[in-house]
């Protein structure tokens, strides 16, 4: 998608088209869609809308919120490197693999 502003509906339609292409050649493959952006940019809103659209299209869809994996400030090692010293990377990897495996 080009950098100009898109509506959530356009982003969701784009994701659905891309998923259909993957399903044509690899029907059982797990697909990870990452939504990134600045604070209060609408990432959670978009993720919830996308999840609903994917489920309506017959796909299993889960939201994994990155904020749930942020280390408390007291557990971070200065100087903080992103993401290694900010996120519980091992726990995040396990969560992603669990979703990939259908758990």
Image (tube, helix red, strand yellow):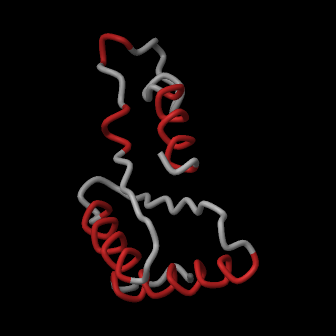
Between residue 53 and residue 3, name the one nearer to us: 53
101 to 5, vertically: above or below: above
Between residue 71 and residue 47, name the one nearer to us: 47
Seen at 28% across and 67% down, the residue is 48
Residue 72 point in image, percent of width and height: 29, 20
Residue 77 point in image, percent of width and height: 45, 12
Residue 94 point in image, percent of width and height: 53, 33
Name, please, the residue furthest toward the right.
25
Determine the image quadrant of residue 75. top left
15 to 69, vertically: above or below: below
Seen at 36% across and 55% down, the residue is 63
Count of numbered marks: 0
Image check: 12 left or right of 8? right
Residue 38 point in image, percent of width and height: 35, 56
Quadrant for the N terminus in the image: bottom right
Between residue 75 and residue 97, name the one nearer to us: 97
Seen at 65% across and 78% down, the residue is 23
Image check: 21 left or right of 84? right
34 to 67, vertically: above or below: below
Between residue 30 and residue 92, name the one nearer to us: 30
1 to 79, vertically: above or below: below
């Amino acid at each position: 998608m080009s950098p100009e502003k898109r509506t959530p509906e356009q982003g969701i339609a784009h994701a659905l088209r891309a998923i259909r292409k993957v399903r044509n050649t690899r029907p059982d493959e797990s697909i990870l869609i990452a939504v990134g952006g600045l604070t209060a940019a609408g990432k959670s809103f978009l993720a919830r809308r996308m999840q609903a659209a994917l489920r309506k299209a017959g796909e299993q869809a889960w939201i994994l919120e990155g904020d749930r994996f942020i280390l408390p400030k007291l557990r971070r090692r200065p100087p903080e490197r992103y993401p290694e010293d900010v996120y519980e990377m091992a726990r995040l990897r396990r969560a992603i693999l669990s979703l990939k495996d259908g758990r």
